[in-house]
Image (cartoon, rainbow, N blue to C red):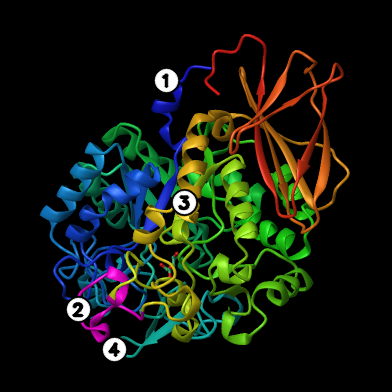
Amino acid sequence: MRVSDTADLWWKNAVLYCLDVETYMDWDDDGTGDFPGLVQRLDHLVDLGVTCLWLMPFYPTAERDDGYDITDFYGVDPRLGTHGDVVELIRTAHDRGLRVIVDLVVNHTSDQHPWFKESRKSTDNPYRDWYVWRSDTPPDTSDQVVFPDQEDSIWELDEKTGEYYLHQFYKTQPDLNVTNPLVRDEIAKIVGFWTQLGIDGFRMDAVPFLLDTSGNGDGEAARLPDPHGYLRDIRAFLDRRTNGGILLGEVNLPFEQQLEFYGGADGDELTMQFDFIGMQATYLSLARGDAGPLATALQGRPATAPDSQWATFVRNHDELTLDKLTEPERQEVFAAFGPESEMQIYDRGLIRRLPPMLGGDPRRVRMVYSLLFSLPGTPTLFYGEEIGMGEQLSVGSRLAVRTPMQWTSGTNGGFSRAKAAKLPGPVVTGGYAPEFVNVADQRKDPDSLLSFFRLLISRRKECPELGWGSFEVLEQPHAAVLAHLCSWDDGALVALHNLGPEPVVVPVDLDGCGAEHLLADLLVEGTTAVDAQGRAELALEGYGYRWLRVVAPGTRRLL
Ligand code: NOJ
């Protein structure tokens, strides 16, 4: 193994951290989080150990989709700061060894974007073809809408010209027309603009929707002839403009289709993709106390090109979607983790955070994060997970998990000194309120969840075999246990996770190992002997977890 490789392909063993500037830290006391506030909190992130920030949209917006409805792709929402503040953030983050990626939301614009305002003026407006219009009555598309609580069609009649425009998301988010070369040029300019300011890549929103040009009509001529060729072009452009910039794509599709978005064996499209399948299988496994669904999902992940990578997660900023489970499976997860209708959304997801779903049981919460950090792929955190924040169900939408970050036990959780009414949303109340869950208290407590995250992240960084290596589920007799082995060159790591409440002893069989090997615990002190046949017996508490390095004779790795 060449440790230097891990620097070139930095995303393969990174730890990503997603945050919204608006809800992270308010430095000018106007109630809205801002870039100067985020800069003040970078050292929390360095201390935590994450290596790359993903900033949710911070552009000027009409605020109909929490910033995902953009009115100027080149601007900065004035409530959050200026271009100068963004540059200061990037500069300071880089000084601390943190990379920064930003959301690239070019499937659609806000309906308040000047391009759309022009486009809807007349059928011969120069911007008409920047969006997707049809003059005939659209068919029933109610089964295609993403937000069924608000929309019943992906086409909206625009009174002025009597034609319909395409909107895969809310009707306030008209889809851009990427068959138009002027739109493609503009998207390249947007990519070029932010990379020129020094960012390290993009989280790319809604990629399959961006590439799907079927809304342009039935004729092949109307569509983008080679959608994946277009994605390759964006990647090639980013590669030319940056030194190792990444495209992390949102592609919630079955694994085999995701492979196409990596560019298959060539790996020349998206650099990374979220593993939605593994995430959903994790919740099914947790609900059942049976590692089987997760093991099946992990074994079903197709091999990617060596430089491509999966982004793993247990929570993101959207609904916790369970859309890839079968209906009975989804109902099992709902019953276990979100039985009340106010906890569910769109008939497919939950608006809760992990700790409340697990009844606040610290053993289970830690076990799940240990699992996340031990799986192959790059772990991706959503702000507040490191302290075990809960959700605010009374918000009643995806925003329930986008509440202000909880820094202290003081007013507004230390997020802002403004009046509560001026904040972007309520601070969490109840058992997960800042009084009980905050950074300041946990920083000083070696037994806190925050301290546990620091440990996990530092061990994770020492184990590049997790991000780079081969993955194997180890056979063992306990259904509740996931035992897996990640190996890469001279490194191998065994991880054990008990999804059930009963203590167990797990026999493992390690091919190629013998009595000269040793298993060294990485999360606690301790070693376990391996016998001449490569077998070892490992005890696990209920909801227990262990990471064990396979120590070969003469190794020079530090233990
Ligand atoms: C996916 C984003 O994650 C979500 O928050 C947003 O509403 C839609 N794309 C539309 O941009």
Question: Within 10 Å of the Cα at label 2, are there few (<14), some (14-19), or many (20+) other Cα atoms?
Answer: some
Q: Are marks 4 and 1 in contact (CB under 8 Å)?
A: no
Q: Secondary structure at mark 2?
A: loop
Kindly report the distance in space between the C-alpha atoms of the residues bearing marks 4 and 1: 59 Å
| Residue 379 makes an appearance in the image | yes
* Ligand 1 has an atom within 8 Å of the beta carbon of the residue at disc 3: no
Write down the region rendered in magenta: 411-426
What's the amino acid at mark 4? Lys
Task: Tell me the residue that label 4 is attached to.
Answer: 160
Crowding near pointer 3: few (<14 within 10 Å), some, many (20+)?
many
- Mark number displayed over residue 249: 3
Q: Residue furthest bottom?
A: 159
* Among numbered discs 2 and 4, the one appearing first in the sequence: 4
Residue labelled with disc 2: 418
Q: Is residue 478 above or below residue 462?
A: below
Q: Which of the two discs, 4 and 1, labels the residue nearer the N terminus?
A: 1
User: Camera-side residue: 497 or 154?
Assistant: 497
* Amino acid tagged 2: Ala
- In this rendering, the label closer to the viewer, 2 or 4: 2
Find the distance from the CA under tag 3 to the CA under tag 1.
26 Å
